[in-house]
Image: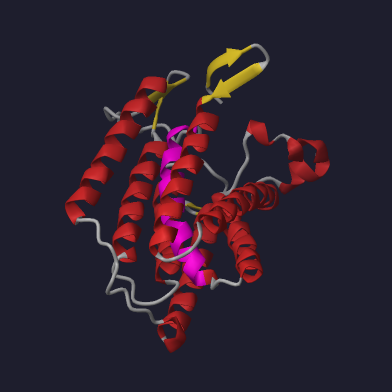
């Protein structure tokens, strides 16, 4: 990981800083959205904390099980060295969803109501956090201006591809939240949308392949898409999840587009200056 600066024994890394900014930004956005739906700030704050912790644990476990199980089973102490990398976003999402469901039962609020708020903020957080990621893509066969020189090779900045798509998904979810037809709509859109994003970006990354150009991440994304479609079918056919959003406070579309452009421009500047 790229170190920005250090103060005595304390080291500040680019990835860690961007993840911290991502969590803070997502928390504020989620609390703002929760207020509009009559949900208390502390409930969303606690949900974010639960989601972050569960997400990290799940991401580590999935990476160990699906990407390099033989190594970690032979070297169990390496499992704890999370600072050296090795996380699976699919595992993070899955375990965070399970933890969020358990939390929703505890606070006696519909899981889908909480999830619809959480996933919009999560898409924003994933975009911001990816800016600090130092896992580059494949070597460019045809050199493009946006390629990044890593060890003398011009690499695909897979992080850039992903955070741009994450920001677009964030704006789509934000817009849908103001015209929502049923609880769980945003949750399903996120599950399918992010899986498609990861499937696209995966073609530019280096991961263990299982068939042709398709990797383990592609398989996991496919499973998530199928699960999302099943949940979508269930929610659409169940009247108890239908909602009216006639009194929603709508942020004009042009402001959302401006926010998208600013997010992309600022993120690109930060990424290329640091890298």
Count of marks overlaid on the render: 0
Picture quarter with the C terminus:
top left
Q: In this view, does 32 lie above or below 205?
A: below
Indicate left or right for 79 with 206 as reference. Answer: right
Residue 190 in magenta stretch: no
Picture quarter with the N terminus:
top right
Residue 267 falls in image quadrant: top left
Residue 173 picture location, percent across and down: 35, 60
Q: Which of 119 and 113 is in front in this view?
A: 113
Q: Which of 54 and 246 is in front in this view?
A: 246
Q: Nearer the viewer, residue 87 or 266?
A: 266
Indicate left or right for 166 with 82 as reference. Answer: left
Residue 139 picture location, percent across and down: 42, 32
Indicate left or right for 44 with 116 as reference. Answer: right
Q: Is residue 188 visible?
A: yes
At 41% from the left and 43% from the top, the residue drawn is 127
Chain part drawn in magenta: 112-133
Main SS class of the magenta portion in the image: helix
Residue 235 falls in image quadrant: bottom left
Q: Is residue 238 visible?
A: no
Residue 120 in magenta stretch: yes
At 62% from the left and 67% from the top, the residue drawn is 107
At 36% from the left and 27% from the top, the residue drawn is 270
């Amino acid at each position: 990981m790229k170190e920005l600066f250090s103060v005595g024994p304390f080291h500040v890394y680019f990835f860690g800083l961007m993840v911290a900014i991502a969590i803070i930004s997502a928390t504020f956005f989620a609390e703002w959205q929760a207020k509009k739906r009559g949900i208390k700030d502390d409930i969303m704050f606690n949900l974010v904390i639960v989601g972050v912790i569960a997400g990290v644990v799940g991401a580590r476990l999935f990476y160990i099980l699906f990407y390099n199980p033989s190594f970690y089973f032979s070297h169990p102490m390496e499992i704890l060295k999370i600072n050296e990398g090795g996380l699976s976003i699919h595992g993070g999402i899955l375990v965070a969803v399970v933890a969020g469901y358990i939390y929703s039962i505890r606070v006696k609020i519909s899981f889908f109501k909480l999830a619809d708020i959480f996933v919009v903020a999560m898409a924003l957080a994933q975009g911001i956090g990816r800016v600090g990621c130092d896992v580059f893509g494949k070597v460019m066969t045809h050199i493009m201006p946006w390629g990044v020189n890593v060890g003398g090779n011009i690499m695909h900045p897979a992080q850039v591809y992903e955070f741009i798509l994450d920001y677009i998904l964030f704006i789509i979810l934000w817009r849908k939240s103001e015209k929502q037809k049923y609880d769980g709509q945003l949750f399903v859109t996120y599950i399918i949308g992010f899986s498609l994003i990861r499937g696209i970006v995966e073609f530019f990354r280096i991961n263990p392949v299982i068939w042709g150009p398709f990797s383990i991440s592609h398989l996991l994304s496919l499973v998530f898409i199928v699960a999302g479609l099943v949940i979508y079918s269930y929610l659409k056919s169940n009247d108890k999840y239908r909602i009216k959003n006639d009194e929603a406070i709508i942020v004009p579309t042009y402001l959302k587009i401006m926010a998208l452009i600013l997010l992309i421009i600022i993120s690109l500047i930060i990424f290329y200056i640091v890298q």
